[in-house]
Image (tube, coloured by chain):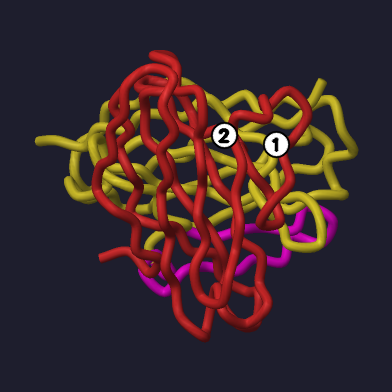
Chain colours: A yellow, B red
Amino acid sequence: EVQLVQSGAEVKKPGESLRISCKGSGYIFTNSWISWVRQVPGKGLEWMGRIDPSDSYTKYSSSFEGHVTISVDQARTTAYLQWSSLRASDSAIYYCARQQGSSFYFGSWGQGTPVSVSS
Amino acid sequence: QSVLTQPPSVSGAPGQRVTISCTGNSSNVGTHHEVHWYQQIPGTAPKLLIYNNIYRPSGIPDRFSASKSGTSSSLAISGLRPEDEGDYFCQSCDSRMTHWVFGGGTKLTV
């Protein structure tokens, strides 16, 4: 069974750094891209960026490029999303998703990691 | 403002049929790129409902169906059940398949 298990909820202050994780299992980790998707509570889904775990090639949405970094650890079959300096507007739920097929739809999702940034 | 346009809400009585539209443009939905649909029950992660315009993943009942024509897609849910309540999102990609875009979501009330 394919599973994406994300790290737990985080409470941070503006300016702090943060890294959240997404561990994949039940499939060959390097065979599928992983994307990160943001959801502000009560709002829609925003694609942030994706990584190819086989070579760590990344692609970011222009809305997030330069503010977040996506990386992977193949040995741990884990993808990461990190910020060097959080803002209050980063408060949201973050989902990782495994992309599948020739059209790269989001076939499996993590359970979500809530991030709260407040002074 | 989302790249793909969906109605904010739809509603229907148990047993009825509803449809949810998703409209893009020539740089995403219209350029031969597939549309996918996701269901998000309150408090849970999104779940793939329809992929490549019309296909249901294993375990998704045939009450859910979708179609695509031109720059639009439509999700239909027949035999509405209370457990269908939630948000429904469409998704596609840009013309170079390098960026992925979502609709704003439609809240279904049963």
Of residues A97 and A107, the one drawn nearer to the viewer in this rendering: A107
Name which residue type carries label 2: Ser
Q: Position of residue A3 (x, y in %)?
A: 72, 24
Residue A36 — which label?
none
Q: In the figure, is residue B92 to the left or right of B60?
A: left
Q: Callout 2 environment at 10 Å: few (<14), some (14 to 19), or many (20+)?
A: many
First to last magenta residue range? A48-66
Q: Do labels 1 and 2 share a chain?
A: yes
Cβ atoms at labels 1 and 2 below 8 Å apart: yes
Q: Which quadrant would residue B102 be assigned to in this image? A: bottom left
Name the one closer to the observer, B93 or A91: B93
Residue B60 location, x and y as percent?
68, 27
Disc 1 residue type? Answer: Thr
Label of residue A78 in the image: 1
Res. A91 image quadrant = top left
Picture residue at 49% right of the left edge, 53% below the top: B90
Q: How far apart are marks 1 and 2 (CA)?
A: 7 Å
Q: Who's the residue at 27% across and 27% down the image?
A: A11
Does the magenta portion include A55?
A: yes
Is disc 1 placed on a helix, strand or loop?
strand
Tag 2 residue: A21
Residue extending furthest left?
A: A119
Q: Quick one: quadrant of the N terminus of chain A?
A: top right
Q: Mark 1 lies on which chain?
A: A
Q: Which residue is drawn at 44% across and 16% down?
A: B81
Q: Can residue B33 be seen in this view?
A: yes
- Residue at the spot 90% in from the left edge and 38% down from the top edge: A28
